Image: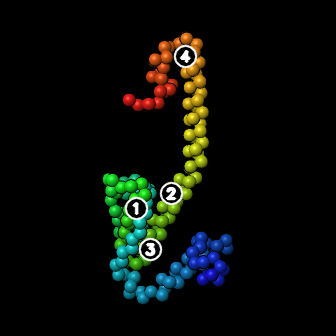
C-alpha cells in the first residue's frame, strides 16, 4: 500500500497509540507540497448527494451549513430542490473559498452526512420493533372489536372506531 501498511491512503484518524493515522498524514504531506501562495486563491469544489439526504446536511434553518461556514470561512451552497424531482434525484453542493477552507468544509459536511446516515441505520431496528409493536396492538384491538361485535353488548358496531381507542385508522 501507499502508506507501507497495505491499508491504502485513507485511514481512520488516530491509531491506537495516538499517532496520526497514515491517511491523514498522507493528506498533510500533499498539502505541504503546495506552493503557500496558492492557499489564498479562491477555489470551488463541488459534489452531488441524493436530494433526500440534503435536509440533514443543511440542518434546521441552515444551522449545520452556518456552522461549517463559520468554522472554515468557506461558502457552502446547495442547489434548490426541484418540485418534480424523482426519488433518485441528486443536488449539487458547491464549496467556495481558499483551498484548505474548501477541503475542510467538505470534510465537515461529509462527517455530518455520514454521522446522520449511521444514526439512521442504528435507529432502523428500533423503528422495525415499533412497527411490530403497533401491528400487535392493532391485532389486539381487532380481536377486541370482534368480541364486542359478537357479544351484542356495548355500543353498536357502527359507532365503534370513532372513540378514544382509535380503531378506525382511515381519514375521511
Question: What secondary structure is found at the residue carrying circle 3?
Answer: helix
Of marks 4 and 1, which one's residue comes earlier in the chain? Answer: 1
Disc 3 from disc 1: Cα separation: 21 Å
Question: What secondary structure is found at the residue carrying circle 4?
Answer: helix
Q: Which mark's residue is nearer the viewer, 4 or 3?
A: 4
Q: Which mark's residue is nearer the viewer, 1 or 2?
A: 1
Residue tagged by mark 1? 90
Question: What secondary structure is found at the residue carrying circle 2?
Answer: helix
Residue tagged by mark 4? 149
Question: Which of the 4 image quadrants contains residue 109?
Answer: bottom left
Q: Can you see residue 59?
A: no
Q: Position of residue 41 (x, y in %)?
A: 35, 81
Q: Which mark's residue is nearer the viewer, 2 or 4?
A: 4
| Mark 3 Cα-neighbour bin, 10 Å: few <14, some 14–19, many ≥20 | some
Disc 1 from disc 2: Cα separation: 17 Å
Q: Can you see residue 48?
A: yes
Which residue is at a point 45% across and 22% down the rendered structure image?
Answer: 162
Of marks 1 and 2, which one's residue comes earlier in the chain? Answer: 1
Of marks 2 and 4, which one's residue comes earlier in the chain? Answer: 2
| Mark 1 Cα-neighbour bin, 10 Å: few <14, some 14–19, many ≥20 | some
Residue tagged by mark 3? 103
Instruction: Indicate which disc residue 128 carries.
Output: none
Question: What secondary structure is found at the residue carrying circle 1?
Answer: strand
Q: Position of residue 148 (x, y in %)?
A: 56, 17
Of marks 4 and 3, which one's residue comes earlier in the chain? Answer: 3
Q: Quadrant of the N terminus?
A: bottom right
Disc 4 from disc 3: Cα separation: 66 Å
Residue tagged by mark 2? 116
Amino acid at each position: 500500500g501507499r502508506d507501507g501498511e497495505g491499508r491504502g491512503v485513507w485511514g481512520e484518524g488516530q491509531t491506537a497509540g495516538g499517532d496520526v493515522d497514515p491517511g491523514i498524514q498522507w493528506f498533510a504531506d500533499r498539502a505541504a507540497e503546495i506552493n503557500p501562495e496558492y492557499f489564498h486563491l479562491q477555489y470551488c469544489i463541488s459534489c452531488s448527494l441524493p436530494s433526500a439526504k440534503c435536509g440533514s446536511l443543511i440542518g434546521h434553518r441552515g444551522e449545520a451549513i452556518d456552522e461549517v461556514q463559520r468554522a472554515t470561512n468557506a461558502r457552502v451552497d446547495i442547489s434548490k430542490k426541484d418540485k418534480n424531482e424523482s426519488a433518485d434525484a441528486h443536488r449539487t453542493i458547491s464549496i467556495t473559498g481558499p483551498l484548505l477552507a474548501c477541503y475542510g468544509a467538505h470534510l465537515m459536511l461529509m462527517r455530518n452526512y455520514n454521522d446522520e446516515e449511521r444514526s439512521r441505520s442504528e435507529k432502523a431496528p428500533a423503528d422495525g420493533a415499533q412497527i411490530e409493536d403497533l401491528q400487535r396492538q392493532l391485532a389486539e384491538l381487532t380481536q377486541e372489536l370482534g368480541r364486542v361485535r359478537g357479544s351484542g353488548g356495548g355500543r353498536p358496531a357502527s359507532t365503534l372506531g370513532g372513540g378514544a381507542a382509535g380503531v378506525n385508522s382511515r381519514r375521511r
